[in-house]
Image (spheres, rainbow, N blue to C red):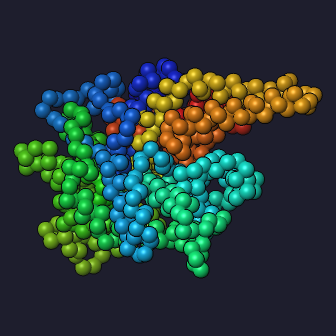
Amino acid sequence: MASVDRGEPEGLDSPQGPKQNWHQRIFVNRSLALGKIRCFGFDMDHTLWLVERAGTERIGSGGSRGWAARHQPPDSVWASAAYKSPAYEALAFQLLLELLACIRYPHEILRYTYNPTFPTRGLLFSALYGNLLKVDAHGNVLLGAHGFTFLSEAEIWSFYPNKFIQRDDLQCFHILNALFNLPETYLYASLADFSSGCSRYTNCDTGYQHGNLFMSFRSPFQDVTDAINNVHQSGCLKEKTLEDLEKYVEKDAIMTYLFSISEVSIGVLRAWLGWAVQRAIMTYPFSISEVSIGVLRAWLGWAVQRAIMTYPFSISEAEASVRPWRSYFDPIVVDTQKPRLFAEGVVLRQVNTDSGKLRVGTYTGSHQHCALYSGGSSDMVCELLGVRGKGILYIGDHIFGDILKSKKRQGWRTCLVVPELSWELDIWAREEERMEELKRLDTHLADPNQHMDGSSCELQVINFTKREIQRVTRELDLCYSTVGSLFRCGFRQTLFSSRLMRYADLYTATCLNFLYYLLSSLFRVAPELVGLCGISMAVPERLP
């Protein structure tokens, strides 16, 4: 029988395990039976390559409940590499600054150094006013900052009437959802901070004046976008990373698991190396039964990719010679140009693994074991594997490129990897008293019996309660980062959180958490009376 796992935390002391094991959990938005999944697909950067951040705990073998827990021979090493995330983000940030200085930006901007405690994902950059915004799913502004200075409520109302924006207006707002957007987020804040503090500039709402020249905030936005494209297309970020892999990539053996088990056939990988491929190094094999898909997305040429991939799999010279990294993936597809992979795609070609050159013509043959392809589309991948859309569980970290497109275009089942989840769950548990205080204030403000006469005294109490809610919310936000939690602002869900709930069937802190579940597991969401029993809760049903 299939084991049943609801997959979502029911409280700080879940009956399925103590809260310190939450980082091993897979959470559920829509019910999913693993037994019906024929192929597992994985993104690479920040999915198979783990992110190492301050405060996060590494996964250990204790408390394992899944299939891998029953097979732990002493001679097997499950290798893992982790981005040395702040170091790599600092490198990308520094390269972007240098490019801006080369196009006549003041050299004083080079004094800025990357601070990983400031940015978080899910912010919007307001190209008109140069502000960073945190909004909810409906476009209500929860928080705003110009440079490193937070906007007051009055300033937010002034810039954005009713504290509301049309978040789908891509001419005015740029969504910074991805992990590789973190250096970009900090760069926008740094440029706004510089222009605000420079005595040579006269600040305006939509830019700044320097003599007879006016620079709108849209101009730096375009320059930063061009700089990002330059860094990735020129390969300078890739080259810097390859020059010192040990500095930017942490290779670590974190688990002892068997590489091949009797009921396990082929390791599965769907991988995408976008511009961030340079900063991450593939780490470990992933072996699951009745699985035959592995897709590797790379902007890099095959020769460079081969050099990168060899590094993490060479735990020892003996192991590297026995089982090369390519043997874990079947097939390997490079240069898929996501999100085009999930739409019209590009021509599917075979790659010569010795020379790295593409073979002329479109590949039309049957699937070959461990074959290397370039381009293609998700339809072609499904055809090669003989699998329909809902037979694939696709696991990635990018809501738009990985989850939304694969769900809407192909109907694949999806799992979003959110590396920050483990850290945020720990904070949620640690700050339980603040959450209880916020719940008490929220309940007091919502009590209809408290504010019946509308007297000035009652209005003072209401205003005081609102200020206390703002104070506690800000204190709670600072526990996560300078701009707060990825998922919430107080009790209000962010845009990132709402999109996660809408498009991801499952979500978890790391794809390694599948090791703690049986391949016959049923992830089942609790039934809800939608819209009929919504109340303020100090403990979330699904998100931290």
- Which residue is located at x 27 percent, y 79 percent? 361
Q: Position of residue 512 (x, y in %)?
A: 33, 38
Q: How many marks?
A: 0
Q: Seen in the image, is 54 located left or right of residue 14?
A: left
Could one spot residue 311 in this view of the protein? yes
Could one spot residue 381 in this view of the protein? no
Q: Nearer the viewer, residue 2 or 456?
A: 456
Q: Seen in the image, is 448 located left or right of residue 33?
A: right
- Which residue is located at x 42 percent, y 49 percent? 115
Answer with the quarter of the image where residue 454 lies: top right
Q: Nearer the viewer, residue 506 or 459?
A: 459
- Which residue is located at x 62 percent, y 65 percent? 203
Q: Nearer the viewer, residue 124 or 462?
A: 462
Q: Is residue 190 above or below residue 101?
A: above
Q: Is residue 249 above or below residue 28?
A: below
Answer with the quarter of the image where residue 526 lies: top right
Q: Seen in the image, is 33 located left or right of residue 236?
A: right
- Which residue is located at x 64 percent, y 59 percent? 167
Question: What quarter of the picture does the N terminus occupy?
Answer: top left
Q: Position of residue 98 (x, y in %)?
A: 36, 67
Q: Position of residue 228 (x, y in %)?
A: 41, 66
Q: Position of residue 176 (x, y in %)?
A: 51, 56
